[in-house]
Amino acid sequence: MDIEMLRPVKLTINWSGNHDTLDAVDQSSAIASQFNCPGVYVHLSKDSSGNPICRYLGKHTSSLSGRQFEHFTNMFDGKYNLYGKSGKLIFKAGDGNPSIDDLDEYLSITSIYFGTIDKYPSFPVDSWVACIESLLMRSQKWSSYSGTILNYRLEPPRYQMFSEFEIIHSNNSDMQSLFGSSTKWDKKTKSIF
């Protein structure tokens, strides 16, 4: 094991969004080509008061925009629950294919935010992306949105091998409102804040 892995890590995520889902999945769009890279992403809606409603937090180790195309295909094929403007379930996964109106309603209220890192430290990118996603999913703010998140699976908490692992949230007020200015693991207190 490399001793450097045990030292504190501080990474800045440059968040971009809110992006329209159809722009993100259209491989000919500027958004799709800009985010044909590793990182994390959030699917987010807002309620009538403007408060965030979290739908999904994920990662991809090579193409964030390619992963959005996979999500869109799965939605179209009826593999996901879809929620409408009222926050209620409008389509239940496995009940065939959603109607165009159901898809349109869900897509009209859901935006995508992409989080990228300018330069990863010397360690495989896959591992950094997994550490970031795992830490964000365990943050107090993210886990407080029970009932509206589509994905509850958790990556192994690899960030715990570091004495501290801090993510600074940059460039986006929506993501700073959601996660705070930073998300941090502290091995001494065994806490995420």
Image (spheres, rainbow, N blue to C red):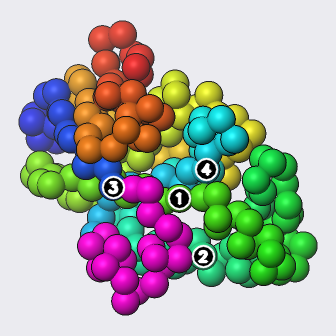
Return the x and y of residue 163 as percentages of the image width and height. 23, 23
60 vs 34, left or right, is right
Per the image, the residue denoted by label 1 is: 111
Q: Is residue 58 in sight in this rendering?
A: no
- The answer to whether residue 188 shows anywhere in this view is yes
The magenta segment is 17-36
Callout 4 secondary element: strand
* Residue 149 badge: none
Instruction: Label 3: state its secondary structure.
Output: strand
Q: Are marks 1 and 4 in contact (CB under 8 Å)?
A: yes
Q: Residue furthest top?
A: 189
Which residue in the protein does label 2 denote? Answer: 72
Residue type at mark 1 is Ser
Q: CA distance from mark 3 to mark 2?
A: 19 Å
* Residue 45: image tag: 4
| Residue 58 placement, left or right of 103 | left
For marks 4 and 2 on the same chain, the one whose residue lies earlier in the sequence? 4
Which residue is denoted by mark 3 in the rendering?
16
Q: Amino acid at mark 2?
A: Phe
Between disc 1 and disc 4, whose residue precedes?
A: 4
Along the horizontal axis of the image, is 181 left or right of 21? left
Q: Secondary structure at mark 2?
A: helix
Mark 3 or mark 4: name the one nearer the start of the chain: 3
Q: x, y (%) of residue 2? A: 11, 41
